[in-house]
Every structure is written in C-alpha cells, then in structure tokens.
Image: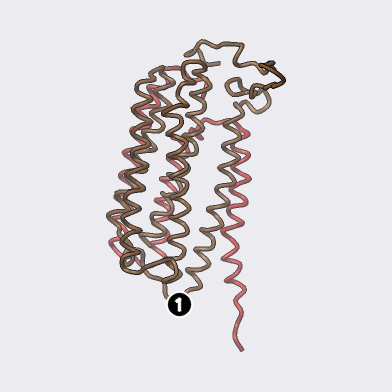
Amino acid sequence: MNTAFPVNPETTRLKTKQTKGLRHYMQIPYTVELRSDTGLFNAKLGVWLFLASEVMLFGALFSSYVLLRVGADHWPHGWEELNIPLATLNTVVLISSSVTMVMSWASLKMGSFKKYKMYMGLTILCALIFLVVKGFEYGHKFEIGHYPSHDTFLAIYFTLTGLHGLHVIGGIVLNSYLWGPGSRMWNSQPERFTNRVEVAGLYWHFVDLVWIFLFPVLYLL
Amino acid sequence: MSETHAEDIKKHVRTYIMVFVALLALTIVTVTVSTLHLSTFAAVTVALIIAAIKGSLVASYFMHLISEKKLIYAVLVLTVVFFVGLMFLPVSAFSDKITMP
C-alpha cells in the first residue's frame, strides 16, 4: 500500500451500505486496494482492456489505409496535400500534453494538489490548442473544396484524423471533469482520485500514441 | 505504480523530462528526413522505425509499461497478435491478385 496517503479502511473495503429509504448502494471494489490475483486495482485492468479494443479500432482503419494506398493507381504525397508545419506544431502540442498529464499524476503522488491543478489545466489547454490547429487545417481544406469525397486520400485522412479528434474531445471532457468537479474526491479519497488520474492518463497517452503514428503515415509519406 | 514513494516519483519526473526531449528530437528527425524525399520504401521504413521508437517511449515511460504487472503484458501480447493479423490482411489480399484474362 502507498504510504503517502492515510488509508481509510472504511473507504477501501468492499461493503454494502443502507441509505435512505429502500436504496442500497454497493461501493465499487478494488479502486485502491490491489486485487491479489491480478496485482492491480480494477480500473487499471479495465482501461487497458479498453485500450486493447481501441488498438483494434484504429488498427482496422490503418489496415484499410494500407489496402487503399497499395491498390491506388496514384497516391499523393502527404506534403503535397497537407500542411506539415501545422501538423508538426500539433505533434509538439500533443507530446507536451502527455508530459503535463503524467506530471499531474506525479504531483498528486507527491501530495501537491495545487501542482496537479496546474498540470491538468495545461493538459486541457494543450488539447484545446490541438483542436483549434486541427480546425484551421480542416477549414483550409473545405475552403478549397477538398472534402472527404474529393479523393481516396482525403477520405481516409478525414476518417483517421476525425476519429482521433473525437478521442481528443473525449479526453478534454474526461480531464475537465477530473480538473473541476471530480477533483473534490481528493479531499475524501486521495488515493482513489490519484488512481483515477492515472487511468485517465493511460487513455490520454494512448491518444498521443495514435497521433505519433498518424502524423508520419498521413503527412510525411 | 501504487507502491512508489515520493522520492521515487522525483526520479520519475527526471525521466519524464528526458523522454519529452527525446520525443521532440525524434519529431524533428522524422520531419527532416521527410524533406529529403527518399524512395517510398526507404521513407516508409525510416518513418515507421522512428514512430515505433516514439511510441515505445510513450508506452514504456508515460504509461509505465516498463514496470507493469504480468496480466497487463498478457493482454497486450494478445492484442499485438491480433493487430499483426489485422495488418497481414492487406498483404494477403495483394498476394492473391485477380488477374484479368
């Protein structure tokens, strides 16, 4: 067990409580305590299983990309069609947000809620910058009439970056909750909150990881 | 990672900064290489190797895979097997080309 936080056995043990009226609620087990068989808290295994399914989702689209590209008579180079400087900027922004995300978790581990708020705030800010830059890229494409229907390259470009963009939006929603109202949990169950931030981080790093592959595949090749 | 103490975390933070610098450097390298306009085969090989290194850095250090429990590795090994299968589909499709008479 972590010694950085006082452990309240009341909150870490699985138990049923009777509340007002007929409502019963059961506390979610193993949010802090490690299961003896898996050696993990449940949310971590859950998120990793979710990420495994995400690998297959993006994998299916990557494999479609390969099929479309190899089968095409002509395939434009990314640098002819797309804005490399903007995408490079976005790569730097997303990598930075991954660092601030892991720093926000490390801050909680070191007991500094103030630093957590700062780093998590920066993570959300970076994610918003990423979306704004992506918005400019999309906007320019639409201005010159380059819609997904324009050619196969743009169809797969919009599909892959669009799905990735949705993941960025999902991350913003999740991280904003953990930055705002969700952060109240720090006062009552600090370890559980730290674990929440850790698994939110796993998701966020995955979104960064997908971009690390999307960037060269779509823009640089 | 829940067994780590504040002192260990401070060491981790230094690692995170180093990984950050490495990721930025590799981004510059991959963009620079792309301006050389190598042959498609060489360009794809170099770009994917650099992306794989960057991806491994993120997974190993930011996602803490360097020191994770066995069950997570087992899940990921299974995922890799299926992912490789998925990537093999386009390859098998092209080895079975329909030839026009």
Image quadrant assignment for residue B16 = top left
Residue at point 32%, 57% (across, down)? A137
**A152 horizontally vs A133: left or right:** right
Q: Which residue is mark 1?
A: A73
Q: In the picture, residue A205 is in which quadrant?
A: top left
A198 or A166, nearer to the observer:
A166
Q: Residue at x 35, y 21 (%)?
A: A114
Residue A109, relative to residue B77: is it above or below? above
A139 versus B3 height, above or below: below
Question: Residue A209 appears in which quarter of the rendering?
Answer: top left
Amino acid at the residue labelled 1: Asp
According to the colouring, which chain is red? B
Mark 1 residue element = loop
Q: Colour of chain A?
A: brown
Q: Position of residue B77 (x, y in %)?
A: 61, 43
* Category of crowding for the residue at label 1, using alpha-carbon neighbours closer than 10 angstroms: few (below 14), some (14–19), many (at least 20): few
